[in-house]
Amino acid sequence: MARLDQGRPLEREPVDLATVVGQAVDAAHAVEPDRPLSLAVDAPVTVVGDRRRLRQVVDNLLANVRTHTPPGCPARVSVGSENGNAVLEVADEGPGIDPAAAERVFERFYRADTSRSRDNGGVGLGLSIVAAITDAHGGRVRVASRDGGGASFQVELPRHGPDGVDVSSN
């Protein structure tokens, strides 16, 4: 967050988002092997961005699943394209998010469950980091409670670089 706040530039290189997400899902399986975690990828999805920061986005979203859903609760990760943008979605079948909390989850230090301590619930920076990195890439992030329970986080990233070069054919 401090680096982003200082305006330090992100790396700008073509990144296959599907590969980055696949690596993060593999790491999440290693951390929590008993959680059903599926990955759906339509095809390679190339964006221009900072590979390490994009990995941090996915890692934070998967950590959010581990923190806010019961052990063994299924989650799905998908990567695809929609309206010329790359779309990453992390959806779980947990308890969902209260609408009032959903409006604030991307704020720094906001914790929907105030009963959690810093030892077992974090300090409320994970999703604000997701939002800041996504914004720095020219994208946006949304959250929604899903019908039947669960939460869905969608990250949309442009399929072009800062110079306007379209990489969507990659």
Image: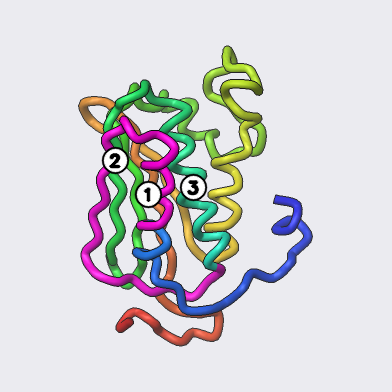
Q: In which quarter of the image is residue 99?
A: top left
**Residue drawn at 65 percent across, 23 percent down:** 118
**Residue drawn at 74 percent across, 66 percent down:** 8
Distance between mark 1 and mark 3 Cα atoms: 8 Å
Q: Is residue 158 above or below residue 4?
A: below
Circle 3 SS class: helix
Identify the mark nearer the N-term, 1 or 2: 1
Q: Is residue 138 above or below residue 122?
A: below
Dot 2 and dot 3 residues touching (CB under 8 Å)? no
Q: In front: 1, or 35?
A: 35
Q: Residue 59 carries which label?
A: 3
Location of the C terminus (image quadrant): bottom left
**Magenta segment includes 38:** yes
Residue 145 visible: no
Tag 1 residue: 25
Distance between mark 2 and mark 3 Cα atoms: 13 Å
